[in-house]
Amino acid sequence: MIARRGTGDRLLRMALPKGALYAESVALLARAGLDVGALADPGRQLTVRAGDIEYIIGKPTDIPVYVAYGGVDVAIAGKDVLIESDLDVVEMADLHFGGCRFVVAERADAPRSVAEIYRHLGVIRVATKYPRITEAHYASRGLQVELVKLSGNIELAPLIGLADQVVDITATGRTLAENRLRIVDEVLASTARFVANPVSLKTDSDRVTGLAAALAAAAAPAEEG
Amino acid sequence: MQPVTPRGFRDVLFDEAREREIVAAAITDAFGAWGYEPVETPVVEEYETLRAATGGDLDRTAFRLFDLDGSLLALRPEMTVPIARVVASRLTDTPGPHRIRYVADVFREHASLRGQARQFTQVGVELVGTRGPAADVEVVLLLIAALEVAGLSSYLVGIGTAEVLRALVERAGGPAEWRDAAIAAAQSRNLVELDRLAGREDLTPALSTALREVPRIRGGREALDRCDALASACDCEGVVCELRQVWTTLEELGATANVQLDFGIMRSFGYYTGMQLEAYAPGLGLPLAGGGRYDGPLAAFDRPAPAAGFALGLERLMIALAEQERTPRLEPLDAVIGGTESAGVFRAAARLRDAGWRVRVAPGRTGMALVRDADGARAIEALVADGASVSRLDRTGGVATPLGDPVPEPPRLTWAARGGDER
């Protein structure tokens, strides 16, 4: 599948993720000296034109799809979403915000330990929103899993007996703790990235690399969060 | 039942099929003019054959099947390995170099709901048995020729090499894990990870800088000079020497207008061993073509020989042409010919075809029914045969003017000049 966008002079198109990364993305664009226009308060608009960029506001998990298939030239996306999508995009710069960790968590008050369950049943039941990352993690640990993909509130799965462990992202660990889950393993750390479509990088090289440089410069490295 | 095509496969009908035929023929004619000979290979190969020559990625992409003997086969995912197999097994007594062209359907497995086709058509060339800048130039010129005759109004060819990065990584030495990670990061276009790896503490500043900068270099001769300077500062002199000769020749030929040097092109590392090339259409998010110099497959078949080539994706090319409003114009049917007497209709149609007409027969049809047939077939004329004479019908189905003898030239030849209005 390829996005068909017509020819001729066109605006550079950039996708921004709605939700947790949105406000910081807009703040970074402003710090980098870009006209952010109506981006700060887009209301229900899904597209915003500001300066010579057309911004697309999309669901975070869809953004790698927009980029890889060329619907947009560049985007800001979480590393977590990029890994999970497994699509071909160019990762241009680490933007050092939106820090979070992928962790394995299980019930703090479980009657039987996961190790014991594994010894007798030979498989760990795992719930996650991120099947690809999860599968790769357990494979690297040499553990057999039954993986169930859920769409949200992953921390419920152990409480209702659906899963022994969950793989989820956390910034502070508080939601997990509030649901009596404790972190037992680290999977990977994630921050927001500036990514580009591989062809846009070649055919619109100056604008794409210029933007990458401006955003990288404006993105001050922060502490791991 | 309601029959369907399997996911990722599709039927190609009429107008689209003719347009694809025209574009593929224009390109293969251009390759033919360079003395490239066509080759056809089986749709299936032994899985082992493909794996020995490509390794790695095949597991994820090969469309595999077992035959009744239990052999593991795979539908060809591309044509380079099948052609390497042909060269290594069938052409051992024929002196090279071999200049081979193909139009072939290839197959790749994809997970569902990613909007990806599992069968597509590649048009390409392989130049086997010769190395050096002249051979690389030939391949680049063939790619340009293909894009030109296909009718694109705007395109870009990128040429680069993975040898610079490979040399820098070797020069850096250190743990194998670090080197593998650096190559993997470059190949997956993860510049953030490559930057991180370039920060290895024991690297010289020159190496760190070169590792960070080289994958970001693109442009004309100045790009080559920059890359050369960075590599030379790391004692990797001469690593862009061949590419420089390629570029110089292209410049001498005035062929660099749509070509850019790009050290960020990192196609499969295990495969390509020198120049790599890609083609793009602005506004289309995936390359139209890819290829380069590869020596591995033939070495894997115990017939080491230098080889280079590329494949154009016909589907992507057709999309690019449509976007640029350069889809080939299809000539209409000249006529539908009817009449009460079958033999007379066939005889008259044969006479028209001899005169160059494209004619569909409609024995037994006359009058308004025949006019409707001609409209349905988007034919320029509705004709009726009566004995030895052939006449045109008017819009109401009445016999209008005789066609005349000898048969006039096909109306489609003047149709385009008249602005293309049908009938």
Image (cartoon, coloured by chain):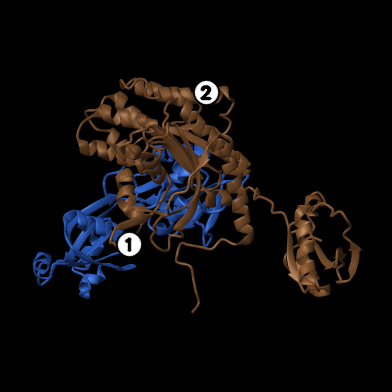
Chain colours: A blue, B brown
Please tell me the numbered disc located at residue A6.
Answer: none
Q: Is residue B213 left or right of residue B384?
A: left
Please tell me the numbered disc located at residue B249.
Answer: 2
Q: Amino acid at mark 2?
A: Thr
Residue B210: percent from left, percent from top? 35, 28
Q: Amino acid at mark 1?
A: Asp
Measured Cα–Cα span from mark 2 to mark 1: 50 Å
* Residue A40 appears anywhere in the view: no
Residue A1: percent from left, percent from top? 49, 56
Give the secondary structure at mark 1.
Answer: loop
* Identity of the residue drawn at 21% across and 28% down: B202
Q: In the image shown, does A93 or B304 lie closer to the viewer?
A: B304
On whether disc 2 and disc 1 are found on a single subunit, the reply is: yes
Please report, as a chain letter, where disc 1 is located: B
Task: Determine the image quadrant of residue B307.
Answer: top left
Residue A188: percent from left, percent from top? 25, 51
Q: Earlier in the sequence, mark 2 or mark 1?
A: 1
* Residue B44 appears anywhere in the view: yes
Residue carrying label 1: B67
**Against B11, is B167 above or below?**
above
> What quarter of the picture does the C terminus of chain B occupy?
bottom right
Task: Determine the image quadrant of residue B293.
Answer: top left
Please report, as a chain letter, where disc 2 is located: B
Give the secondary structure at mark 2.
Answer: helix
